[in-house]
Image (spheres, rainbow, N blue to C red):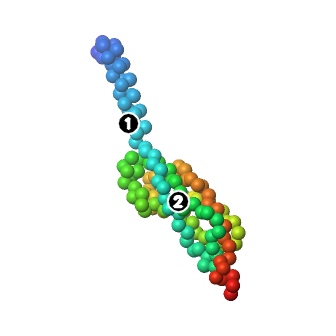
Amino acid sequence: MADFLKKLFLENWQYKLGAFITALVLWFYVASEQNLSVVINAPVQFDNFPSDMAIINKVANSADIELTGRRDIVNNINKKEVKVIINLKGSKEGKNNYRITPLNIKSIPRGLEIRNVTPYQIEIELQQSKAKAGK
């Protein structure tokens, strides 16, 4: 038995070591390729916009969302369905800052991680609209 094991490991050890290293390199390559990253440009939409207010500054109309996850999930994302929704309920006149969090991002499939959002915050400056101010 000892001779068998000795022969198994020591005979042609250079080829066996080379095959082991090749297999290890290939395994690391395949394992690292399982996750994929993608950046989606999603439109920003506003919910509960105060009817008596108007936006007076330039506001970003889209956000870049970096997603990471399994290759099969990333490849099947319907990019047109991904949206950033900001709830303006309770907004006041003047500057209002809204941070974009994962709760604001809609239609992201399960199994994906949001890595980064640019811009991470949206500033909206509201002013009493002229139609309502005159009443």
* The image quarter in which residue 98 lies: bottom right
- Which mark, residue 62? 2
Q: Residues within 10 Å of mark 2 (few under 14, many from 20)?
A: some
Horizontal side of residue 88 vs 28, given as left or right: right
Toward the bottom, the furthest residue is 135
> Where does residue 131 sit, x and y in percent of width and height?
64, 82
Image: 39 above or below 54: above
Q: How far is mark 1 from mark 2, CA to CA?
A: 34 Å
* The image quarter in which residue 22 lies: top left
Image: 28 above or below 12: below
Q: Residue at x 42, y 57 (%)?
A: 79
Q: Are marks 1 and 2 in contact (CB under 8 Å)?
A: no
Q: Residue at x 60, y 79 (%)?
A: 51
* The image quarter in which residue 27 lies: top left
* Residue named by callout 1: 30
Q: Is residue 65 visible?
A: yes
Amino acid type at circle 2 is Ser
User: Residue 55 versus residue 120: which sits nearer the camera?
Assistant: 55
Quarter of the image with the C terminus is: bottom right
Secondary structure of the residue carrying tag 2 is strand
Q: Residue at x 68, y 73 (%)?
A: 127
Amino acid type at circle 1 is Val
> Where does residue 118 sit, x and y in percent of width and height?
56, 53
> Where does residue 101 sit, x and y in percent of width and height?
57, 58
Q: Between disc 1 and disc 2, whose residue precedes?
A: 1
Horizontal side of residue 38 vs 102, given as left or right: left
Q: Residue at x 30, y 13 (%)?
A: 12
Horizontal side of residue 42 vs 94, given as left or right: left
Q: Residues within 10 Å of mark 1 (few under 14, many from 20)?
A: few
